[in-house]
Amino acid sequence: MEKMVKFNLRYDELLKKIPYKYAIPVVVAKRAEAIREYAKPFVITDDENPVSIAFMELSLNYIRIKNEEILKALIPKVK
């Protein structure tokens, strides 16, 4: 039997793992759309909101950003 996940989302904790604040919502939105349309969630939870489920999956490392090299270009180079 699979374990049900209880989750308290902390965006600042997620930013420590993925330092691209504009990429996180895009990744979550794409995953939520997939969950809503056809994909089975990787976590079991009482929450039925696809966005919440996608945030859980990203925070728990069930999904990840494929090409982080492209995202590094988004980080501003400020002196």
Image (spheres, rainbow, N blue to C red):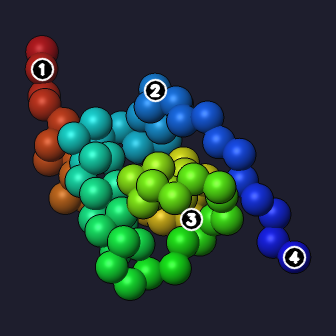
Q: Position of residue 16 (x, y in %)?
A: 48, 33
| Residue on which disc 4 sits | 1
Circle 3 residue = 62
Q: CA distance from mark 4 to mark 3?
A: 18 Å
Kindly identify which numbered label has been placed on residue 55. none
Q: Residue furthest right?
A: 1
Q: How many marks?
A: 4
Q: Is residue 3 above or below residue 75?
A: below
User: 10 Å neighbourhood of mark 4: few (<14), some, or many (≥20)?
Assistant: few
Q: Residues within 10 Å of mark 1 (few under 14, many from 20)?
A: few
Kind of residue at badge 3: Tyr
Q: Are marks 2 and 1 in contact (CB under 8 Å)?
A: no
The x and y percentages for residue 78 are 12, 20
Q: Which residue is mark 2?
A: 12
Q: Position of residue 60 (x, y in %)?
A: 61, 53
- Which label sits in the foreground, 3 or 1? 3
Q: Earlier in the sequence, mark 3 or mark 1?
A: 3
Could you tell whether 70 is left or right of 12 in the image?
Answer: left
Q: Residue at x 46, y 26 (%)?
A: 12
Disc 4 versus disc 3: nearer the observer: 4
Q: Quadrant of the N terminus?
A: bottom right
Residue at mark 4 to residue at mark 1: CA–CA distance: 50 Å
Quadrant in the rendering for residue 39: bottom left
- The amino acid pointed to by label 1 is Val
Whichever of labels 2 and 1 marks the residue nearer the N terminus, that label is 2
Q: Secondary structure at mark 4?
A: loop
For residue 66, side relative to residue 3 (left or right): left
